[in-house]
Amino acid sequence: MSRKRRRPHKPSRRTLPELSSRLRGALAYRRFVAPPYTIALLDGRYHLHGECTRALTRLGHRVLPIAVDAASPANTVKALLYACIEQRVDMLLSINQMGFDEGGHLGTLLEQIELPVASWYVDSPHFVLRGAPLPAAAVSTVFVWERSFVASLRALGLQDVHYLPLATDPEVFRPLGYGESRALCFVGDSMKRACAKWQARLGHNARRQAGDVAAALLADRQRDPFEVVGTERDERHACDIVAAGTWRATRDYRAGLLRAIDSPALCVHGDDGWGEQLSQARLCGPVNYGAPLAALYESSAININATSLQMQSAVNQRVFDAPASGGFVLSDAQSDLLELFEPGREIAVYRDADELAAQVERFLHDEEARRMITARARARVLAEHRYEHRLQRVLDVVSARHASPAVRRTSCEPSGASPCL
């Protein structure tokens, strides 16, 4: 996705007072000397926080959750400073920029103390940033689950950007011995609320443009939605239009696919918006992420996957979680999926609504094919697509950039003491 180039981010020294020489001395320790490492994690509402914590722990590292205080960013800053001084943090990990305040307090601190930051986006970074500069850009290594964002972020002046797909936690998503109790299962949002939320931010002309974005993405998910909006809008407004159009396109895309297989055999787990889209399917309500979802995957003959249109090539967690749970997946043929798995042998795919209906009919009557594909997919997931694999990649990249030479202890840092904050 091409974007207008922005000037490189310069930290604002007005958001935080300069650190004292005593405090700087306490923070002048070597990073990434040798594993195990100490990683601070900005804690938040994402399930991915728990998955990253468990994966890093299994890799032998220590994870320090940093409580995010949105009402008082200074408390988050203080908590991180204490963690760095007391525990000698090697790196800060953030998911979707969770924990960074709009005032820039935390970002400025991180640049002042030169603490390496790994920022992993699992949603569009443009929707998260909305035209604002990346916080702590000078010390950040950015990872994106959708490879098209590598180029678009580099166009904004960020150079240390890497593709990092999602994965699974096999301690959570594992076979539990459930037999098949339903034919077809879809787990996902109708996008009703997301569409309403983002549409409400737009005026009449902007809503029309959002409709143009949706139509363009439905015709070709590889289309750059920002090209549809054009350059007359400011960056923040353009991001809002693209977000509204993307969620609308995803709503229509998923509804069109599920209508092709709408029947009493289809169980849909999601929000109440599906009642407006489907007439025959059983609407089963939301399901909690984790063990309940793993059980659902395992007990469904076919798990349908329909990827959000914010993803040109990427895959969601379902293509890893379901086979890890012993469940068969029938997914739209995202290009990354065809690299992560061997199509036909480790994953079953469809390319449009007609092929989805045909593949459903085929695999419902071929239990042996489902069983073999699922077994091979699960073996591939365990060998290559666990969160340990992804977090090891993060550590390799960040430590290669930030491993520091020996730092002299300054005379103002008393041995064994923690300076007052």
Image (cartoon, rainbow, N blue to C red):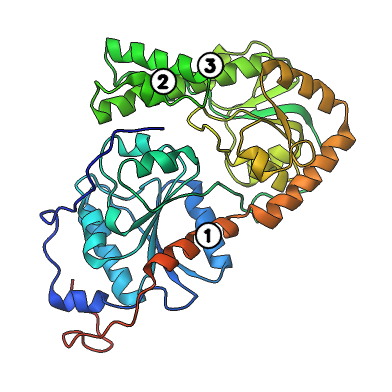
Which percent across, then down, holds residue 286? 57, 31
Distance from disc 1 to disc 2, alpha carbons, whole Å, reads 33 Å
Quadrant of the rendering where the C terminus is positioned: bottom left
> 389 above or below 304?
below
Front position in the image: 232 or 332:
232
Name the residue rendered at 34%, 22% in the picture.
241
Q: Which residue is mark 3?
A: 219
Tell me which label, 3 or 2, sits earlier in the chain: 3
Three-letter amino acid code at the position of disc 2:
Gly
Which percent across, then down, holds residue 309? 51, 27
| Element on which disc 2 rests | helix
Distance from disc 1 to disc 3, alpha carbons, whole Å, reads 35 Å
Name the residue rendered at 41%, 20% in the picture.
245
Q: Which residue is mark 2?
A: 245
Three-letter amino acid code at the position of disc 1:
Arg
> 192 above or below 34?
above
Three-letter amino acid code at the position of disc 3:
Ala
Front position in the image: 70 or 34:
34
Q: Residues within 10 Å of mark 2 (few under 14, many from 20)?
A: many
| Element on which disc 3 rests | helix
| Element on which disc 1 rests | helix
Front position in the image: 266 or 357:
357
Which percent across, then down, holds residue 213? 41, 18
- Report the side of 413 relative to 271 (left or right): left
Label 3 vs label 2, nearer the camera:
3
Tell me which label, 1 or 2, sits earlier in the chain: 2
Labelled pair 1, 3 in contact (Cβ < 8 Å) = no
Question: Which labelled disc corresponds to residue 393?
Answer: 1
